[in-house]
């Protein structure tokens, strides 16, 4: 079970007020959105509707053109390039840095359960396949000593085979923080116990309960 700090469970983790974002079609007056600590939101929409930009804004990497986007908890953002994973450092070393209080044998076991064997986790992460790198990046986020209170994922299933998708689903179902995931894979979204769907279009955004 991957549980963020208790203080983040029942409070607002992201607040968007009249936010106008680059490349995101604005509703009249901008976008208003509140994400709480237990929400699990699937973001859908056609290419060019601003899905990735929305996540980048929540992560603090894009500033709104107008209005505000405020995040109140530590954020883990995994973009499609997995830019947060150091390609020159081994997976094991990066996970050890994220969770220095855990014994190495436990870290190795957790990585093995994801299909990352002893050889892979000692190689520089840049040598791994796309699916292996995604598993490694998720492990560093979810197995951290203190997991992030908000997890942002941009098309995480793109590089995964069936076994990888099943491992991803297991990890995300166990995560107890706020989750915002962009995906075109309806089957994946259906299996993640989402609480809401956020549909983006050229007409704006619509948040609906599942």
Image (spheres, helix red, strand yellow):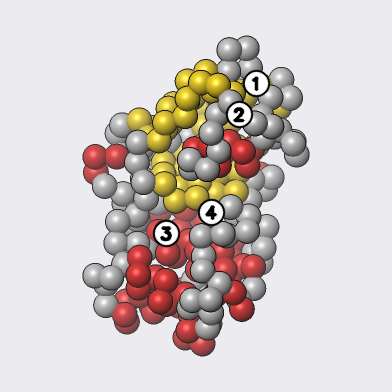
Residue 162 occupies which quadrant of the picture? bottom right
Q: Is residue 210 visible?
A: no
Distance between mark 4 and mark 3 Cα atoms: 9 Å
Nearest to the observer: residue 6 or residue 124: 124
Residue indicated by mark 2? 21
Residue indicated by mark 1? 26
Task: List x then y, in percent, for residue 113.
Answer: 45, 74
Task: List x then y, in percent, for residue 138.
Answer: 48, 61
Distance between mark 4 and mark 1 Cα atoms: 25 Å
Task: List x then y, in percent, for residue 14.
Answer: 42, 32
Distance between mark 1 and mark 3 Cα atoms: 32 Å
Q: Residues within 10 Å of mark 3 (few under 14, many from 20)?
A: many
Q: Residues within 10 Å of mark 2 (few under 14, many from 20)?
A: many
| Residues at marks 4 and 3 touching, judged by CB atoms closer than 8 Å | yes
Distance between mark 3 and mark 2 Cα atoms: 26 Å
Sequence-first disc among 1 and 3:
1
Sequence-first disc among 2 and 1:
2
Vertical placement of 146 versus 194: above or below? Answer: below
Q: How many marks?
A: 4
Nearest to the observer: residue 67 or residue 131: 67
Helix or strand or loop: what does disc 2 sit on? Answer: loop
Most extreme residue toward the top, as rendered? 28
Residue indicated by mark 4? 78
Residue plotted at (67% across, 35% down): 50
Distance between mark 4 and mark 2 Cα atoms: 19 Å
Distance between mark 2 and mark 1 Cα atoms: 7 Å
Q: Is residue 49 visible?
A: yes
Residue 25 occupies which quadrant of the picture? top right
Residue plotted at (40% across, 54% down): 174
Helix or strand or loop: what does disc 3 sit on? Answer: helix
């Amino acid at each position: 079970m991957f549980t963020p700090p208790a203080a983040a469970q029942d409070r607002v983790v992201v607040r968007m007020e009249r936010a106008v974002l680059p490349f995101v079609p604005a509703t009249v007056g901008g976008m208003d959105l509140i994400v709480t600590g237990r929400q699990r939101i699937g973001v859908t929409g056609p290419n060019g509707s601003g899905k990735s930009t929305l996540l980048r804004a929540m992560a603090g990497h894009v500033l709104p053109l107008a209005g505000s986007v405020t995040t109140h908890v530590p954020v883990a953002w995994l973009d499609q390039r997995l830019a947060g994973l150091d390609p020159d450092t081994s997976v094991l070393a990066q996970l050890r840095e994220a969770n220095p209080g855990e014994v190495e044998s436990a870290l190795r076991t957790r990585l093995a359960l994801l299909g990352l064997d002893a050889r892979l986790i000692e190689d520089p992460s840049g040598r791994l396949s796309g699916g292996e790198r995604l598993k490694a990046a998720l492990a560093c986020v979810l197995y951290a000593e203190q997991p992030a209170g908000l997890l942002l994922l941009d098309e995480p299933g793109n590089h995964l085979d069936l076994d990888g998708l099943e491992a991803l689903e297991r990890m995300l179902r166990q995560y107890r923080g706020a989750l915002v995931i962009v995906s075109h894979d309806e089957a994946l979204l259906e299996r993640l116990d989402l609480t809401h769907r956020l549909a983006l279009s050229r007409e704006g955004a619509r948040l609906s309960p599942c």
